[in-house]
Image (cartoon, rainbow, N blue to C red):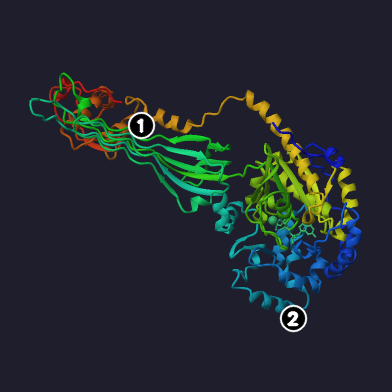
Amino acid sequence: MSSVSISFSPLALSLPNKPYRKNPSQKPNPQFISKSKSKSKSTSKSKAKSKSKSSSSDEKLTSSSSIAIEATSYTRLPPRDDFLASSLIDAYREIKLSDSYVVTKSEEGQRISKELHGEKLIGFDYKEYETPDVGEDDEDEDFEEDYDSDEEDIDYIEGREEDGEIVVFGGEEFEGFKEGDEDEDEEEKEKGVPAVMRCFDRAKIFVKAGNGGNGVVAFRREKFVPLGGPSGGDGGKGGNVYVEVDGAMNSLLPFRNCLHYRAGRGSHGQGSDQNGAKGEDVVVKIAPGTVIREAREDGVVGEVLLELLHPGQRALLLPGGRGGRGNAAFKSGMNKVPRIAENGEEGHEMWLELELKLVADVGIVGAPNAGKSTLLSVISAARPEIANYPFTTLLPNLGVVSFDYDSTMIVADLPGLLEGAHRGFGLGHEFLRHTERCSVLVHVVDGSSPQPEYEFDAIRLELELFNPELAEKPYLVAFNKMDLPEASERWESFEQHLLAEDIQPFCMSAISKQGTHEVVCAAYELVRKIREAAKEVEGLAAPVNLNHVAEEIKKKRAFPINDFDITHDSSSKTWHVVGDGLERFVQMTNWSYVDSDKRFQHVLEACGVNKSLIDRGVKEGDTVNIAGLERIWYNAPGSASSSGAKNKSTDSIRWPSWK
Ligand SMILES: Nc1nc2c(ncn2[C@@H]2O[C@H](COP(=O)(O)OP(=O)(O)OP(=O)(O)O)[C@@H](O)[C@H]2O)c(=O)[nH]1
Ligand SMILES: [Mg+2]
């Protein structure tokens, strides 16, 4: 075994491994707001400043960075004054609108924003994105005109002031959250998720097990073999539906092209006692971390059927239908020439909802544009898109960080989070879901943002509000963009702020790879501890039964035929006899053969349907519906118990037992 060559800096060793607990006293500090307002009056100024001060910032890091500095403050959610500055308006136009942008257009929008974030408003105020407030009317118009000129890139919705926030993602839109109509809002949000994102981690597929092949009626005809007897073979079994975890998949996008998965049907039996071949199985390949639910017609979220995490796991989901018996199987001493064979059993079918929650050891979280993708790109071979505008990343990116051949971890770069993400704002639900399966979280904080402390607190709060378990996960904090002077200026106050909460943050410049090694090593140390703890627990835990869905279906198939319910509709004089066993029996009866009806009568008699109907007072002429099959009841002459077909000669035949 090779040794893991990881060197830990003293900073990394002092990493707090305690889960974060929400501190209710962490409310927005008005001092911060006023401070930042005065500090960041002009972004252009700060750009110039950042250039002149770059050498001093480098002192904080061990070696200086030769990489060009990019001021990124305009892509953040800036203080209102900043936003109104004309330099920012120019900058705002530069934002790549085809990817994303957020607008609050009206008074109503502001009101909703306030209501939504009301008591626990931390950090961003979305009313700052009120485009009509840009200043003078003329300017406003200019802006709108400029904006309109970009219309070929995006679908921009106008004149819907009452709707509050409008979010546009690559030409698709949804309306912002409005308190009081969550249900409608859910639908709206679903609509607003761009197709590629929906397909990335959600899919709805149809699966069907193969039907069994039919049995046949055949008789042996051969020279020198007189009265060869029945020789109809049984039908083959239908193919099964399996679900298998494919380690090479990291999304559900393949299900975009293929929705229906049908296993092959069993071949029909043939003469000369030849049984049919088994139907072909179908294997549905899914990504690790996929949750499978039954999709219900009423829209209610079905219960989880399977949750497959590890590559190579295979579950039998739907077993194929049984092959029908051929007439050779019905031969008996009393019935030497049976003219009967069964249909193959129908394979079970269902619609499934697949939901992927990425399985990664480390999840990189943070506000948009914090440098999450940059961090992933420098620590792994992954090449995510990196750009100077928010929501560059819309789909999570995975990367493998290798220290040694046997010490690796999977790191996921997740899309940026906004305040209100836990309520679906900025498609937060879509993104936050993926953090649930990460063992460790790395918070990347944009050091160049006016209030990095708020940014960190807001993201932490969003995670906790989305799922309190997320707040219990071990995490570490990486203060990024230390190569920028404004970031290095803020580092000390940020560090003090976190140290007061017993958290030791890391500082780094992802773009120049400085300080990233310490962050990765510290994250790996946390991952290693978690893996060790998980191994211990795994040893004690009982093995999970992956085939329980198929077992349930098989159990249902073996349901006894004499277990049925009878209901009576007096207005239409109809009796309904229902039962899983009876239903299957009716489905497998092949009515084209003469003996089928006799056997049907025999089974009804034997399983007590006739007797129960007589006891309940069935009258001649009444309709009896047996598992969907309608018959008219009549009383056979001279018999108290008889049914609606044929005579009693069937009693003399011994039919093989129903199976
Ligand atoms: N100066 C400087 N710029 C950085 C650093 N890290 C990232 N950036 C820049 O910040 C911008 C955003 O970086 P990304 O890595 O795309 O940020 P992100 O957090 O993935 O953004 P989203 O995907 O939109 O959430 C890019 O222009 C990067 O070049 C850094 O350490 N220093
Ligand atoms: Mg990104």
The residue drawn where x is 63% and y is 27% is 538
Is residue 644 at all visible to an observer of this figure?
no
Q: Looking at the rendered structure, which numbered label has been put on residue 138?
A: 2
Please identify the quarter of the rendering in which residue 217 is found: top left
Name the one closer to the observer, 117 or 63: 63
Q: Position of residue 598 (x, y in %)?
A: 18, 29
Instruction: Tell me: 240 left or right of 367.
Output: left
Q: Is residue 559 above or below residue 71?
A: above
Q: Secondary structure at mark 1?
A: helix
Q: Position of residue 183 (x, y in %)?
A: 58, 51
Q: Quadrant of ligand 1?
A: bottom right
Is residue 44 at all visible to an observer of this figure?
yes
Give the residue at the far front of this rendering.
2
The amino acid on which the numbered mark 1 sits, given as a three-letter code, is Asp
The residue drawn where x is 77% and y is 50% is 444
Name the one closer to the observer, 405 or 491: 405
Instruction: Tell me: 298 left or right of 530.
Output: left
Near mark 1 (Cα within 10 A), the count class, few <14, some 14-19 or many ≥20, is some
Mark positioned earlier in the residue sequence (1 or 2) = 2
Near mark 2 (Cα within 10 A), the count class, few <14, some 14-19 or many ≥20, is few
Circles 1 and 2, Cβ within 8 Å, touching? The answer is no
The amino acid on which the numbered mark 2 sits, given as a three-letter code, is Asp
The residue drawn where x is 45% and y is 38% is 242
Give the residue at the far bottom of this rendering.
138
Q: Looking at the rendered structure, which numbered label has been put on residue 218?
A: none
Q: Is residue 350 above or below residue 492?
A: above
Please identify the quarter of the rendering in which residue 170 is found: bottom right
Q: Is residue 278 above or below residue 426?
A: above
The residue carrying mark 2 has its beta carbon less than 8 Å from ligand 1: no
Name the residue tied to disc 1: 580
Please identify the quarter of the rendering in which residue 234 is found: top left
